[in-house]
Amino acid sequence: MRCYFAILIAGAVLTAQTVDRTKPPETQPLPAFKLPPVYETKLPNGLAIVLVEDSRFPLVTVRLTFAAGSKFDPKDLPGLADSTAALLTEGTAKRTSRQLAEEVASIGGTLNGRSTPDTLVLAGGSLAENAPKLIELVADVAQNASFPKDEVELQKQNRLQNLLQQRSEPNFLAQEKFAAVLYGSHPYSRIAPTPASLEKLDAAAVKAFRDARIVPNNAVLILLGKLPSRAAALKLIEADFGSWKQKPINDPPPAVAPEARRQVVLVDRPGSVQADIRAGQLAITRRNPEYVPLVVGTTILGGGASSRLFNSIREKKGYAYSVHSYVDARRESSALTAVTQVRNEVVEPAMQELLGELETIGKERVSAEELTSVKNYLSGRFVMGLESQNGLIEQLNLVKSMALPNDYLETYTTRIRAVEPDQIQRAAAKFISPGRAAIVVVGDAEKIGKSLEKFGNVQVVKSN
Amino acid sequence: MRTHIFTLLLSGSLLLNGAEVSVPIEKYTLSNGMRVILSRDKAVPVVSVYVMYGVGARSEERGRTGFAHLFEHMMFQGSSNAPKGVHFKTVESNGGNLNGSTHSDYTDYFEVLPSNKVAVGLWLESDRMRSLAITDENLTNQKEAVKQERRLSFDNQPYATAIVDHWPMLAFKNWQSYHSLIGSYEDLNAASVKDVSAFFKTYYAPNNAILVLSGDIDNAAAKKLIQTYFGDIPAQPQPKHPDLSEPPDAAPGTKVYKDPLANVPGVVTGYPGPKRRSADYYSLAMLDVLLTGGESSRFQLNLVKGKQSVVSYEANLGWPFGDASDYKDPNMYAMFFIHKPNFTGKQIVDQAQEEFAKIQKEPVDPKELARARTFLLASRLNSLQSSLTRARLLAQYELFDGKPELINTELGLYAAVTPEQIQAAAKKYLTPEKRSVLEIVPAPKEAKP
């Protein structure tokens, strides 16, 4: 029956039209898409609330985000925010770790803490019908985490094994050293704990961090999905979070990031069959007007499979499987980063090719065709990212935690479309400059050390 | 990084507070044999154009390991009207995203596009199905890219060589299943343009393909476009499926692999699994949720917490190359533990076996099973938000079962599994004499100066 139907259609179409296969088809303009409305308010204790009704799926998604990221780790305790985040869900005054896990599972839920350089995030979700229970669980872990001794001990042990495992991966070693080289003494220079800091970490340190920073006036609660009515949702939130006491927050004075300069650091990983290369420099935050031109330029340089770096290093030269560039943006700074992994024999020509592309984009105007193409690419991917509740809530969370203007998401594609070639060239000349790019390579020093000497004074460090 | 990779691609018609969530399906076949599934959802102006071919690494021939994957790379090297570079450029300059991937039993390609660009995706997919540009230059270039991918994703990573190249040799006796899926450098070098052409003609014919459009589409307009672009691509003789049968009563294998790149020990263990979509398959899949699904799973509570021996784990029907959704028998129910150095791999395997023994001895508590069902439902709903996931699932159900509608009905089969059935499946499949074990031991580093 299906075939019969299909054949009928086939007959009708074949006589009705022929197609020019030599060109991409003409298409209609994209239908307008509007973000769902965002409602914002604040509790008397300072907790910022964001509610977004998104009824596409019978689910709710939540983020409770604190300005309590790893940049607030004490100097001798890197990893404290990370461990605090992990331990918030390991027991409260009301529930053991096991009870929490079982209750979360029974509402079709997830609830996990994580830390980023700027924030500590409690992220969760559940079936829509269980939204009240989800809100109560988030409130419990945020306010009443008890950090039981045995859970803290286990978290330390497992984090240590996890760290050892990460340190066997070249990508992690490259990331770790690149942050250290770019950020110098700025707190963004540390991306992970050390065995020594894990050894030192204890329940008292975690509790002190929580008491200082996990407070309502340092947080925003975003609730998105198929929600109860606004009044009902607010009532639930007030009941669960209303009695949470606010406290003064002591923010350290903002740290100063070092000036960009050429440095070449080789992390020796004996036996590596390829070299993991990172090159780049510190740049501007999302709040800077040059940020959008910089993102467009970085995408032309190395975003996706039609970028300049992909075409030269992978498609033309066959040096690498993967090569890309991006702006790794944080609240107080960002790092323009180009990444590739090449086989040992071609480290030098690949580096030359990479630095050559970094130079060109600051020297020559990008073509109109490249620019249009990348504008479409960035706008299209932005809309694509909004298919799921998680995709949408991450965008909203970004706006809040990076202190961006409220219309940031609504105007994002318009701002992308407005970028001119001159703006890209100006931003690139400042922030995609090969002369100031720091270079970090992870690989077998014996095999690739020589190839790097052309690019500066090579500092060789051990991987472990 | 805790990897509780339980895959979400399992369930079906979803009843929540009486409201049913269902994925719309319209299925038909073109006269050249190409199967088409349309699934309209207007929530976001995005469409996934998804093509699945019924050929994977298990179809490879001796001397041509890694060929299915090498061929996948060739699919991005241009076709008559979209020469080299045009595919990437066209998709990305239209605001889209694209990729392809090679699996044991299928290979897939997709473009996720703003929904007004659906014709662009169809133009590209049909052009390469009709007229792939198979040249020596492209082949040479892609052999290098694949070797580079092998170095990046396997040769230079801890655990990867053990899992990808050594584990299948313990798990399977049939060469079709145990040979290297990424391929040896020798075999990659040996692949010729003639091989590529033959493979293309045999396996990349419309009658061996499934096209799915999911997302913001108009079905009638989509059908016209599909007929226009794909309707006159000629069919080819139906390709033969490889013989995957395993010898009966094959002895399990054990091995210790010394991994110079690993810092922390790990162990893989696995058991020959049931027939796809048999009653036992659903029972074992539910058992997998009980063991590994979420923070209240038994492995988490009893091994990571209780015994404090395991650091992280993964498990699946079809692990490591697939999951329950694309599981095709013969295959394994296998798992991977990273564990603390004060335990041996053997001890970890024994601890996992103890967890199975508990279930063999005593049916699971109905409350625990209810929690697992809820976990499954929520995981499934979460994954269905993505048009690409919906497309992939629909194509998998069509390819393996001929029933895309399972996307809306299969959860019922999981929900119906009883504690007694789980107990019986554990007894039948998860016995020590059936398990293969691969210990991955960090190798002493070379002496450093």
Image: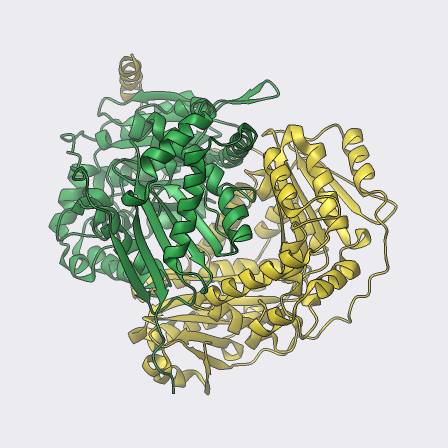
Rendered position, A399 above or below B359: below
Rendered position, B297 above or below B261: above
Taking the image as shown, residue B165 lies to the left or right of residue B239, namely right
Q: Which chain is green?
A: B
Q: Residue A454 occupies which quadrant of the picture? A: bottom left
Quarter of the image with the C terminus of chain B in it = bottom left
Q: Residue A124 occupies which quadrant of the picture? A: top right
Q: Which chain is yellow?
A: A
Give the farthest residue toward the front: B361
Residue A148 location in percent, x, y? 69, 55
Residue A440 location in percent, x, y? 47, 75
Taking the image as shown, residue A439 lies to the left or right of residue B120, namely right
Name the residue at 24% across, 45% down: B57
Residue B326 location in percent, x, y? 34, 36
Rendered position, A144 above or below A388: below
Taking the image as shown, residue B188 lies to the left or right of residue A126, namely left
Residue A168 location in percent, x, y? 43, 68
Name the residue at 30% across, 33% down: B274
- Nearest the camera: B96 or B28? B28
Name the residue at 56% across, 42% down: B296
- Nearest the camera: B147 or B153? B153
